[in-house]
Amino acid sequence: MCGRFALTADRRVVEEFLAMLFEEDAPARYNIAPTQPILVVISSDKQSPGSNMPERRAMLARWGFIPGWVKDPRDFPLLINARAETAAEKASFRAAMRHRRVLIPASGFYEWHRPSKESGEKAQAYWIRPRRQEVVAFAGLMETWSSADGSEVDTAAILTTSANAAMAPIHDRMPVVIRQEDFSRWLDCKTQEPRDVVKFMRPIEDDFFEAIPVSDLVNKVANMGPDVQAPAGPALEKPAPSKRKPSSDDSQLTLF
C-alpha cells in the first residue's frame, strides 16, 4: 500500500523530470496524507512546441478516489490505492484505467512494518526514497466526481503492486513506479489500452529504493516539517541483485 508520501524536490528538478512547466510554485511537502490535495500530471489535448507529443499538464486532485457512479461519498470508502493486478477489471477503477491514467510525482513514500501482536514490538515507520534520483513518478488513476448539485471534485488513487525483495521485509505492497521513458505511453489513453501498459505495472528493481527508519512523527498529519524524515536508525541493508523476474502481475480510509 501507500498511505503517506512526500514531494520535496526543487521545482526545477520536478519540471525537468516530467518535461513540463508548472504554472504556480508548490511548497515542499514532507507528509502528504489521504484526503489532501496532491499533484497529478495528465496528458493534455495540446501538442508540445516542436514536437508531435501531447503536452503534459499539472493539476491538483484530492487523494482519495471516488468513482463517478457513487451517489454519496459519505457512504463509500475512500480509495487511496488501487491494486495494479486488478484495476482494469474492478468496477471502481475500470473506466479510469482506460481513460484517465496519471502520473503522481513524489520524492518517496512512507511505510510501516507492523510486527505480530505476539512479538510485543511497536510498528516501525520507514522513509523510502530512490537511491539515485530526487523524484519519481507513481502510476495513478483519476476521476472527476460530480454531486447532485453540479459541483465537481477531482480525485485520485495511487496504483500499487507486490513488493520487491528490498521492500518485502517491511510490507507486501509498494507503489508502481513509471520510468521516464514510459511516461508518454502511460499517459496516452487514446491509443494505449490497459493491456498495452500492463507491463509497466511491475515492482521496480530491488535496489531502486532505500528504506530509512524514522520516528513516529510521521504518524500525525499535523507534523509537516523535514523532521519527519530524520533517521531513527540505520537504513536497511542494500539487497543483493535478484535473479528472479519481477511479477506482473490497499488501504482504505473513510471520506469526510
Image: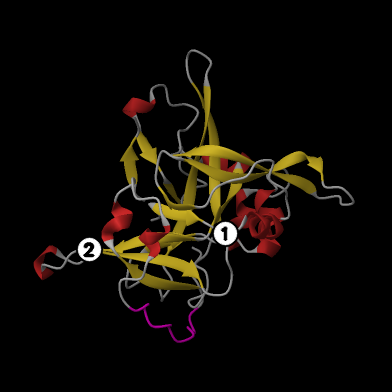
Residue 252, x across and y down, in percent: 34, 44
Q: Which mark is residue 66?
A: none
Q: Amino acid at mark 1?
A: Ala
* Residue 238 is one of the magenta-drawn residues: yes
Q: Amino acid at mark 2?
A: Ala
In-image side of 123 versus 54 (left or right): left
- Highlighted magenta segment, given as a residue range: 234-244
Q: Which residue is found at the position 9% from the left and 67% from the top?
A: 118
Report the residue that reaches farthest toward the right: 50
Q: Vertical placement of 114 versus 27: above or below? A: below
Q: Vertical placement of 156 versus 233: above or below? A: above
Task: Give 157 or 88, whichever is nearer the viewer.
Answer: 157
Task: Give 236 or 234, whichever is nearer the viewer.
Answer: 234
Q: Nearer the viewer, mark 2 or mark 1?
A: 1
Q: From mark 2 to mark 1, how far is it between C-alphas? A: 28 Å
Q: Vertical placement of 130 versus 40: above or below? A: below
Question: In the rendered image, is residue 147 in sight?
Answer: yes
Q: Which SS class for mark 2?
A: loop
User: Mark 1 highlights which residue?
Assistant: 9
Q: Which mark is residue 123?
A: 2
Majority secondary structure in the magenta region: loop
Residue 55, x across and y down, in percent: 77, 45
Q: Quadrant of residue 161?
A: bottom left
